[in-house]
Amino acid sequence: MHKSINLPILYFGTPVILISTLNEDGSTNIAPSSSIWWLGKSCMIGLDGSSKTTENLKRTRECVLNLASADMVEFVDRIANTTGSKSPPLHKKTLGYRYVPNKAEEAQLTTQSSLKVNSPRITECQIQLEASVDKIHAFSDAPIPMFAFELKIRHSHIEESLLMGDKKQYVDPDKWHPLIMSFRKFYTTNNYIHPSRLEKAPIEAYRIRSSKGITGKTVNAIISRLYKKYRQ
Ligand SMILES: Cc1cc2nc3c(=O)[nH]c(=O)nc-3n(C[C@H](O)[C@H](O)[C@H](O)COP(=O)(O)O)c2cc1C
């Protein structure tokens, strides 16, 4: 039987990322976040309007999405209740947040330079996605302003040991174990439970579907060629 209730939070389980952005003085800020989803070569992230990361993203229009794996839970948790904003807003103070100017040091993480953006990558993260801000959307009518940032992934760096395929071009889901936040607790993926019907199509068909500048007809033609090739 289902019960009708008003949930205080809707954290049903999403991957944790560490967003690295540049502060106005050129130093790096890092923020854990779990409001994220991907579609094609783009990604949407959701952030509290008072975050230092929101301020940095609006100003610099770029960041690195560093995906946290399960074994990074302690690094993430060290900076869970922190902000790069010198004066944390009241709602964060009430929740016990404090100002930390150097989150990399606080978390015991190290950084390395990126190729396409100025924000650095987090070395310890196995998946690092360099991104630029395409659009900024005001999100929901909550008392505290929130924003959804539509990001374009410009460059992906993947730890080699996660890769599979002849040319090592695909992430092996049996090796990639994202850190997942569900209702304020940390989990991960370990149990492979069932094959998926999506697996029947060649994976390259997904690359074509999300490519820009080609017509629907061409996409169909390429996908049917891929089907023939991989069905032989
Ligand atoms: C696991 C985890 C997930 C979080 N997810 C979000 C989120 O999706 N959106 C958000 O605005 N804050 C989220 N937070 C809180 C931010 O980390 C927090 O607002 C922080 O102060 C942002 O840092 P900044 O002010 O330096 O940008 C999350 C925190 C943790 C630990």
Image (cartoon, rainbow, N blue to C red):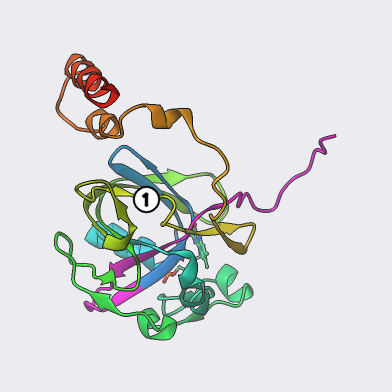
Residue 35, x across and y down, in percent = 48, 52
Q: Which residues are magenta?
A: 1-29
Is residue 159 among what the camera can see?
no
Q: Secondary structure at mark 1?
A: loop
Looking at the rendered image, the quarter that the N terminus falls into is top right
**Residue 83 placement: quadrant:** bottom left
Looking at the rendered image, the quarter that the C terminus falls into is top left
Q: Is residue 128 magenta?
A: no
Residue 201 against residue 69 in the figure, above or below: above
Considering every residue shown, the one lying at the far front of the view is: 232
Foreground pick, 109 / 103:
109
Q: Residue at x 23, y 79 (%)?
A: 25
Is disc 1's CB within 8 Å of ligand 1? no
Residue 41, x across and y down, in percent = 27, 41
Considering every residue shown, the one lying at the far right of the view is: 1
Foreground pick, 99 / 29:
29
Q: Is residue 10 magenta?
A: yes
Residue indicated by mark 1? 172
Secondary structure mostly seen in magenta is: loop
Is residue 172 among what the camera can see?
yes
Q: Residue at x 22, y 30 (%)?
A: 208
**Residue 47 placement: quadrant:** bottom left
Residue 172, x across and y down, in percent = 37, 50
- In the image: residue 11, left or right of residue 76: right
- In the image: residue 90, left or right of residue 102: right
Which amino acid type is marked by label 1? Asp
Residue 177, x across and y down, in percent = 46, 58
- In the image: residue 15, left or right of residue 210: right
Q: Residue at x 29, y 73 (%)?
A: 123
- In the image: residue 150, left or right of residue 147: left
**Residue 30 placement: quadrant:** bottom left
